Image: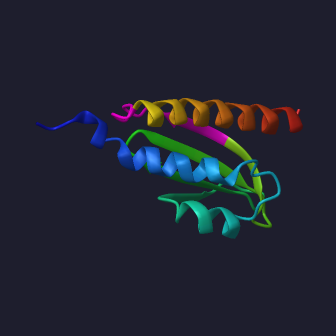
Amino acid sequence: MFEAQYVTEPGRRLHRSFLQLGDMTGKTLREIISVVGAPQAASSIGAGKTLLQWQATGFYIAILFTGDGRFEKITSESVNCYPPADGAQVAGAVIGIVVVIGIVLAVIASHC
């Protein structure tokens, strides 16, 4: 029987990779790509800034980079993964989501 949890495993892996980065403030594009891999899309948005997007089933993130290739802010993020079968992994995913929310709030607060 097919289990839906396997459909979103790529998204969980990508999400965990971003969690490994921790606070991305000041990180370069090269540093981020070395951990999470190449983005699926890149768009120039003027003023030398670039919007990069990563996605895998169940996870999406768009990040704005400055003209010199440094992290500026997360512009959009969505985590919608089926929970893995193992209860310990579910707890880890919840902790990971809480960490990401904390990072996003810290980045937003630093730009206000």
Q: What residue is at 67 percent from the left and 70 percent from the top? A: 30
The quarter of the rendered structure image containing the N terminus is top left
Q: What residue span does the magenta drawing correspond to?
A: 75-86
The number of callouts visible is: 0
**Image coordinates for residue 85, horizontal then vertical, percent:** 33, 33
Q: Which image quadrant for residue 66?
A: bottom right
Q: In this rendering, would 58 be left or right of 109?
A: left
Q: Position of residue 111 (x, y in %)?
A: 86, 38
Q: Residue at x 65, y 49 (%)?
A: 63
User: At which x and y percent is residue 58?
Assistant: 41, 39
Q: Residue furthest left?
A: 1
The vertical placement of 99 against 23, above or below, is above
Which of the 4 image quarters holds residue 31? bottom right
* Image quadrant where one finds the C terminus: top right
Q: Residue at x 53, y 36 (%)?
A: 92
Looking at the image, residue 46 sits to the left or right of residue 93; the answer is right
Q: Quick check: 89 above or below 71?
A: above
- Residue 64 painted magenta: no
Relative side of 40 to 61, left or right: left
Residue at image x 88%, y 38%?
A: 110
Residue 67: where, in percent of width, then height?
78, 63
Q: Give whichever of 68, 110 is nearer the camera.
A: 110
Report the coloring of the rendering: rainbow
Residue 80 lies within the magenta run: yes
Q: Is residue 30 above or below residue 70?
A: below
